[in-house]
Amino acid sequence: MFPVLGTLVVMEAMTQQRATERVLTAILTLRPREERAVCERDPNAWVKQLMAPLHGPDRRPVAEHPAPPNWLRSLPQRRHLPAFFAFDASGRGYDPREPEVPSALWREVQEADVAFEPFALLRSEVVVLARMPWRDGPCAYVLARGPWVDENSVWQTLRTGVLALLVLLFSVPIAMSPIIRRVRNLTQDVQRYASNAYEGTIAARGNDEIAQLARAFGQAGMTVRAQLEARERREQKLREFLANTTHDVMTPLTVLQGHLSGMRDAVAIGKPLERTQVSCAMDEAHYIASLIHNLGAAARLDVADDALELTSLDLRDVVERAISRHRPIARERSVALDGAVSADAVMVRADLTLVEQALSNLIHNAVRYNQPGGMVAVILERDASEHFTLSVIDDGPGIDSESLQLITERGSRGNLARSRAPDGKGFGLHIVQRVAHLHGYTLTLGKSEHGGLGAKLEGRLCTDQS
Amino acid sequence: MSKQVLLIEDDHELGAQVRSCLGQAGYGTHWLQTGRLLRSEDLRDFDLVILDIMLPGVFGLDILKALRNVSDLPVLVLSARNETSDKVRALKLGADDYLTKPFWPEELLERVRARLRRPSLDRQRRVESVGDVRIDCEGREVFVRGERVELTRSEFDVLALLAERPGAAVTRRALMTRVVSSERDASERALDVHVSRIRKKLGTDDVVETVRGIGYRLKIRDSA
C-alpha cells in the first residue's frame, strides 16, 4: 500500500508541476511583437503587466476576487502570485530581486526557446525561462517563477490515500481471518503428520484451494511413507542377508579351517596327505562360495519380485560357464560332469546372474549328493519353434517326492533351510524355483531315467537380439 | 611355441597363483599389476588377455574399451562382483567371457582353453584330425595313419556330425534325428551299434568318446 500511496503523491505533484509550467509558458510565449517596444522602454514595468490577466477588471490581484471565471484566473487564493523577470540577450537582468538563473536553463533555452527546472517533489514552485518572439533586445528572455496551480491537491491525495490505507489495514485482517485460521490449522496438521512419520491422513474439508492443498499434502505424505517403507524393507533384507551370511558361512568355514589344520599337521610330521581330506577341504570351500552366491541371489529375490535385469543371452554360454565352475569339484569327487548344447543359438531374455545361479545350484546339488563314479549331465536343446529345454540329470540317490515338495519351500524349513545337514539342497532348489517363476519358465523335478534326480527347465526363446 | 597370456591383476597373491597355474599348463604369462590403457603394440605378442575389472586407479572397463578399439584379442574378465549389470556391461564392451571370484584354478584353465581353442577343422575342406585319424567331411573319407578306412553312409554321418563340433558332446537324440532316423530300425540300439563299428574300424576307442547321460563326443586334446 505504501508504494502505491507514494506513487499517487508523486504523480499528483508532477501533474501540478506540468500544469503550472503550461500556464506560465502560455503567459510568456503568447506575447505580440508590439510589446517589444513596451519592454525596451521599461523592462520592469513590462514584466509587471504580464500579471495583468491575473488581475480583475479593477486591476487588483485575483486573490481579492471571488472564484475566477477562466483557467488563467484559476490560481489558488494564495498569499503570492507568480513573478516575472526580464533579461537581455546576454543574460543581464534589471530587477535587483531577480533570482540566479542556473546555467543549465540558459543552455536549454538556446535550443528549445523554453526551459524548465527539473521536477522536485518537495518543491511546489515552478521556474520557466522563455525566449521572447523578438529574440533579442533588453527583453530577449523572461523568467517566470510561480507556485503550483493547486498545491493543495497533493495534500488531498495524500490524505485520501492514508485514509484508504487505514481502512484496508483494519478491514483486510477481518476479511482474511477465516482463511488465515484455516491455513494455520493446516500448518499444524501437516507438522503433526510429518512428526508421525506420515501415518494417517490430513483432514480436507470442502473443495476450495486450501482443501486441495491439504489433499496434496496428504498425497505427498503417502508417497513419502511408501518410499520410507520400501527403504526400510530393503535395509531389513540387507540386515538379514548380512546376518544369514555371517551365520551360514561360519560353520563350513570352520570345517574348512579344520581340514586345513589337519593337512598342516600331517605335513608337519611328514605324513602323506590323504586325498579325502583334500577333497573335503575343497568341498567346503566350494560350498561356501555357492552359499554366498545363493544368499546374494535370495536377497535380490526377496527385495522385489521385479528385480530382474533382463538382457538377451545365449543359454549355451550359461551352460558352459556353470559346468566349468563345478567341474573341478566334480573331478575331485570322481563324478563325471558333462554337458551338451544345441548347435544353434538358444537366445532368451533373462537375468544373467540369476539364471546362471539357478543352473549352478542344480549342478552343484547333483554333484554334491552323488557318489564317486556317478555322473551328472546337463543338456540344452531347442525345438524348431520357440522353446528350449534345459535338463540336469544324474544317477545319484535322488529325492523322494514328499521331500521334494517340502524342501522347495524354504519358509517351511525356517532356519534349517540353509543348514548343511541332512541336505542343504533345499535352499538352492528354492532359488531355482523362484528364478523359474520370475522368468516364466516351467520347472519340473522328478526321477531321472538314470535313477537320480531329473530337473528340467522349459521356456520360450526370444527373437529380439537386443 | 606356447600361447602367451597377458594378465592384468593387482592382487599379489591371486596374480601369483594365476601365473603359476597358467605356467604349469604350458602358457607363457606376462603379469601387469597396475592397470593402464593399452596400445596395439602392447598386445602384439599375446594370444589372450585376462583382465580384473576392479583395479585401483584405472577403471577396468575403460581398459577393456580401449583394448577393443585396437585389438580383437580374446578377453577373459575376472570380477569379484556377481552383479548382472557388471557382466552385461563387460560383455557389451567386448569381453569374450567372464569369471566370477572365487574360482578354482582348473576352472580358469578351462575358460582359457575355451577362448584359445582353434578348431583344427580346415574350413576350406572341413577336415578334422584326431590323433592318427583324419576325417574329411567334404570328401566323405576317413584315414587312419594315412590309410583309407571304409565306413558305411550312416557310420560316416555319425562321425561327421561329431566332427562338426569337436570336443562338444552331442545328444543321442540329435544323432538319431540327423543320422539314424532315416533308417528302417531307427533306435538308440542302432546308434550304439554304429558307434561300436566305427570304433572297431578306426582301431581305437580314443576318438569317439561316450558321454554318460548325453551321447557321444569327438575327443580332442587341448594344448597350450
Image: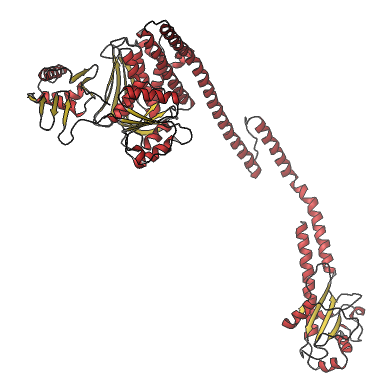
Please provide percent x and percent y for residue A299: 47, 23
Exactly how many numbered labels are in the figure? 0
Please provide percent x and percent y for residue A102: 81, 77
Residue drawn at point x = 80 percent, y = 72 percent: A16
Q: Which is more toward the observer, A138 or A197?
A: A138
Q: Quadrant of residue A115?
A: bottom right
> Vertically, is A340 above or below A401?
below
Mark yes or no: residue B123 visible.
yes
Name the quarter where the C terminus of chain B is drawn. Answer: top left
Name the quarter where the N terminus of chain B is drawn. Answer: top left
Q: Which is more toward the observer, A300 or A376?
A: A376
> In the picture provided, is B211 more to the left or to the right than B10?
left
Q: Quadrant of residue A383?
A: top left
> In the picture provided, is A80 more to the left or to the right than B165?
right
> Vertically, is B52 above or below A90?
above
Q: Which is more toward the observer, A225 or A116?
A: A116
> In the picture provided, is A152 more to the left or to the right than A281?
right
